[in-house]
Image (cartoon, rainbow, N blue to C red):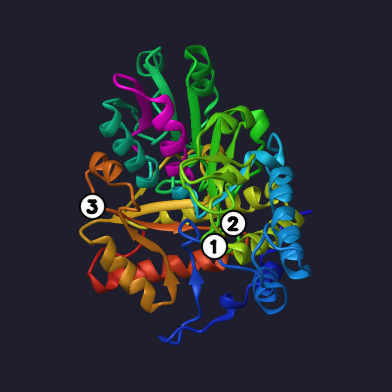
Amino acid sequence: MSLDPYQTRKDFPILSRILPSGKPLVYLDNGASSQKPKSVIDATNDYYTNDNANIHRGVYYLSQHATELFERTRIKTSHFFQAQCAKAIIFTRGTTDSINLVAQAWGRTNIGEGDEIVLSVQEHHSNLVPWQMLALEKKAFLKFIPIQEDTTYDLSNLNQIITKRTKLVALSQMSNVTGTIHDLTKIIDRVRQVGAKILVDGAQAACHMPIHLVDMDVDFYAFSAHKMLGPTGVGVLFGKEEILEAMPPWLGGGDMIESVELESSTYAALPAKLEAGTPNIAGVIGFSHALDYLQKVGMKNIKEHERMLTEYALERLNRIGGLQIYGTEDLDKRGGVVSFTMDGIHPHDVGSILDEEGVAIRVGHHCCQPLMKQLSIPGTCRASFYLYNTKEDIDALVHSIDKVKSIFGRVARK
C-alpha cells in the first residue's frame, strides 16, 4: 500500500497552523526534527495525566504500570530495528548522548596512546567533537575518510586509512547536509579485517528507511526519537550485547547499581548499568507510539515517498538559475534532503524571506563546519522531507525562492 501524505497530514495538528505572517506552515526542516502525530502527543499527555510515577523502584500500581510501559518500548524498539535483543537497547537523551556514552564508557577503556579513530570529513559535530576530546585525552590519532565530488565516501585508499592501529570507525549512514546515503559494506568488511569496532550515526537514516541492525553487523548504532515522530530528549544506543556487558558505566547514580557500600559499588545488569538516574519516561512512552505509527505506515513506503519528493524537488530546483545543489544525483544513494546555495545571497537571507512565506527550512552550517570548509561555503539552505510532505510543499518552496530572486534582483527562473 502506498503512502497518502494528504491523509497522513490529518494526524499532525501543527501542520494546519497559520503562522503570524498569515501564511500556512510549510514544514521542510525534518532533518532537524520531525513533527508529532496526535497519538504521540496524547500518549505523552496521558502518562502525566494518569500514570505519572518513577519507574523500576516502586511496588505500587502507578510505578509498576509506568515501568511496564517504559520497558515495553525497549522491546518494541528492539523488534522495530531487528536488534540483537532488548538488553542491547540503551535509552539516552539523544544521538549526541549516545555517541558520548560510547566515547566515555567504551573509548576511555579501549583506546590508548597511538591508537587511531577513523571518521569522515562530513560528520555532524556530534560524531566529531567527542572523538576529538577522547583523542586529546588518550593521545590517539584521528584519521578521515575523504569524500568525492558527489559527497559519497572515497574508498580508494581505505586500506591505508583503516589499519591495524585503528580501534574505532565512527561514520554517519546518511548525511544531514546532503542526504547522501552511504553504503557501509566495504567499510564494515575492512573494520572486521583489522579487528576494530564500528559506530554508525543513524540520526538521519533511522527515520527514513528500514534498518536491520543484526544484518548490518555494526557494533554501535545511535539515533534520536525526535527525528522519527517521537518526543525530544530521547535517544537510543544499540550495542552488541557482549560489548555493552564489558563496558564500564559512564554515569553513576541511582538505578544503575546492584549494591552500594561507602567506598565501592557493584553495578546492575544491562541495560540498567548504562542508564543512571530517572530517564525521560514520558518521552520514551511517547516514542513507543511513534514506532507504532511508523510501523503502520511502513518504512519502505516512507523511503519511496521521500524518493518521489526528492526527485520532484531536484527537477524543479534545477530549473532555477543561480542555484547550486549539493550531493549525489543518484537517487538510490540519496535520502529526502536537498541542500543548495543561491549565487550572491547568504543562506540566512534566503531562510528569512522563506519564513515570511511560511516555508520553514534550515540554513547555516548544519553542525558540519569541516564539510562547509571543504565545500568553500559558509553554509547552505536545506529542505528536508518526511512522510507528511507533499509536492505542494515543494511548489511553495520554489515559489518562495522565486521571491528571493525577485527581491535581490536576480535573473528570473529559466
Q: Are marks 2 and 1 in contact (CB under 8 Å)?
A: yes
Where 246 sits versus 263, above or below?
above
Q: Secondary structure at mark 3?
A: loop
In magenta stretch: residue 320: no
Amino acid tagged 1: Ser
Q: Is residue 78 visible?
A: yes
Q: Which residue is mark 2?
A: 228
- Cα–Cα span, label 3 and label 1: 25 Å
Q: How far from the left and from the top, in percent, is residue 316?
A: 46, 57
Q: Around disc 3, counting alpha carbons within 10 Å, would you say few (fewer than 14), some (14 to 19), or many (20 or more)?
A: some
Q: Is residue 9 above or below residue 184?
A: below
Q: Nearer the viewer, mark 3 or mark 1?
A: 1
How crowded pointer 2 is (Cα within 10 Å; few <14, some 14-19, many 20+) is rated as many
Image coordinates for residue 123, horizontal then vertical, percent: 38, 40
Position in image of residue 309 (x %, y %): 56, 55
Nearest to N terminus: mark 2 or mark 3: 2
Q: Residue at x 49, y 40 (%)?
A: 264
Q: Which residue is mark 3?
A: 378
Q: Amino acid at mark 3?
A: Pro
Nearer the observer, 17 or 259: 259
Using a 10 Å C-alpha cutoff, classify the residue at mark 1 as few (fewer than 14 neighbours), some (14 to 19) or many (20 or more).
Answer: many
Do the CB atoms of the residues marked 2 and 3 lie less than 8 Å apart? Answer: no
For marks 2 and 1, give the CA distance.
6 Å
* Residue behind mark 1: 34
Q: Which residues are magenta?
A: 98-122
